[in-house]
């Protein structure tokens, strides 16, 4: 009499196992779905504002500001986050707002916290087109894609495991306009370096809104290892001259041009302070003097942890400028 029960249990175990495997393949960052909102920031644009900090086991890699643009017939995503699981959570938020197909994904730059979520949109719609600068595409193909997957797995203790890179296939040209249904998205390529190389900012023309990527962050210091301090300041000036009113930064709250001015001021003040101080003192002596000049930024997130690093990087950049 017991045998059929065992068969039944065995069958259930197998079913559970296969459901588990399926769940592992299509895992979703449920915390983003449950604890975050897609905030409507303009007529057609929603942003899920990520938490401050570095990718970790706790946040499962979620630190950026994924956004989406809802046109009359289709939807586009900007920077879908650090992993396939995060991308699926972004898609779940889109589905709370609209059932229109997601057809386009726009990527601001090479850093993995912005684009490794692409996989979720390819698996949801094989025809999705992924846009980035030609330089970003080149970097991703030349190993940066794989190394970002590894970095993210290490930093999150494998919370992002299973993510496969989907490298954008649509290289953008300067001022290229792309329709998302009745909405126009215009690509602004950043020449030289700001936060890193090969960056693109995306203007949602009808909404007078700009996705800046990490060329701007709002009240937080972020890594500048591959960036330029004067390049960031001059890019902030370029944004200030644009006909936009809503600014969606790569990290931190959405705001207006005041966040651009504040970020540009941080970059230019830090750089000129370092250039001046290096004539009379060593790097390790500069920090208190630089802080005196950065009173507007001293409450920003990660200021204490990252400022020293920024000073060292700014010294290197100033030395390179000498040659
Ligand atoms: Zn970045």
Image (spheres, rainbow, N blue to C red):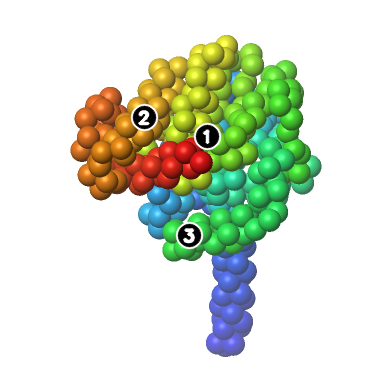
Queried on whether the Cβ of the residue with tag 2 lies below 8 angstroms from ligand 1, the answer reads no
According to the picture, the residue beneath numbered tag 3 turns out to be 159
Secondary element at image label 1: loop
The mark nearer the N terminus, 1 or 2, is 1
Q: Residue at x 61, y 55 (%)?
A: 144
Quadrant placement of the N terminus:
bottom right
Number of numbered labels in the structure image:
3
Closer to the N terminus: mark 3 or mark 1? 3
Query: What number is the disc on residue 272?
Result: 2
x then y, percent, for residue 168: 71, 44
Judged by depth in the image, the label closer to the viewer, 1 or 2, is 2
Mark 1 vs ligand 1: CB under 8 Å? no
Residue drawn 41% across and 20% down? Answer: 261
Per the rendering, the mark at residue 258 is none
Of pointers 2 and 3, the one earlier in the residue sequence: 3
Label 2 sits on a secondary structure element that is helix
Is residue 254 among the parts visible in the rendering? no
**Residue 139 x/y as whole percent:** 66, 50
Q: Which residue is mark 1?
A: 194
Q: Is residue 304 visible?
A: yes
Label 2 close to label 3 by CB (< 8 Å): no
Q: Which residue is drawn at the image coordinates 73% and 33% (left, top)?
A: 172
Q: Residues within 10 Å of mark 3 (few under 14, many from 20)?
A: many
Are circles 1 and 2 on residues that touch, CB within 8 Å? no
Q: CA gap, disc 2 to disc 3? A: 41 Å
Q: Secondary structure at mark 3?
A: loop
- Which residue is at a point 50% across and 19% down the rendered structure image? 237
Most foreground residue, 88 or 184:
184
- Give residue 155's quadrant in the image: bottom left
Above or below residue 1? Residue 231 is above
């Amino acid at each position: 009499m017991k045998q059929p029960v065992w068969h039944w249990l065995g069958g259930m175990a197998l079913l559970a196992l296969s459901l588990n495997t399926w769940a592992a393949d299509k895992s979703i960052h449920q915390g983003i779905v449950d604890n975050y909102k897609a905030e409507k920031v303009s007529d057609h644009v929603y942003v899920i504002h990520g938490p401050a900090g570095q990718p970790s086991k706790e946040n499962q890699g979620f630190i950026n500001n994924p956004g989406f643009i809802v046109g009359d017939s289709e939807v586009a995503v900007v920077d879908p986050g650090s992993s396939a699981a995060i991308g699926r959570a972004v898609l779940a938020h889109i589905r709370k707002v609209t059932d229109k197909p997601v057809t386009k994904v726009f990527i601001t730059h090479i850093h993995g916290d912005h684009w490794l979520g692409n996989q979720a949109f390819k698996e949801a719609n094989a025809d999705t087109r992924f846009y980035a600068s030609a330089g970003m595409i080149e970097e991703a193909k030349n190993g940066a894609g794989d190394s970002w997957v590894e970095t993210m797995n290490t930093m999150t203790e494998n919370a992002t495991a299973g993510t496969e890179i989907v490298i954008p296939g649509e290289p953008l040209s300067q001022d290229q306009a792309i329709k998302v249904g009745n909405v126009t998205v215009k690509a602004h390529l950043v020449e030289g370096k700001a936060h890193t190389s090969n960056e693109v900012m995306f203007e949602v023309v009808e909404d007078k809104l700009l996705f800046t990527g990490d060329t701007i962050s709002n009240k937080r210091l972020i890594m500048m290892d591959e960036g330029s301090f004067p390049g960031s300041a001059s890019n902030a000036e370029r944004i200030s001259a644009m006909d936009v009113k809503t600014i969606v930064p790569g990290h931190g709250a959405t705001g207006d041009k005041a966040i651009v001015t504040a970020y540009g001021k941080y970059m230019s003040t830090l750089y000129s302070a370092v250039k001046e101080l290096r004539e009379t003192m060593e790097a390790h002596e500069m920090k208190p003097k630089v802080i005196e000049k950065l009173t507007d930024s001293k409450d920003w997130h990660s200021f204490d942890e990252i400022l020293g690093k920024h000073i060292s990087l700014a010294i290197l950049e100033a030395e390179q400028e000498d040659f």
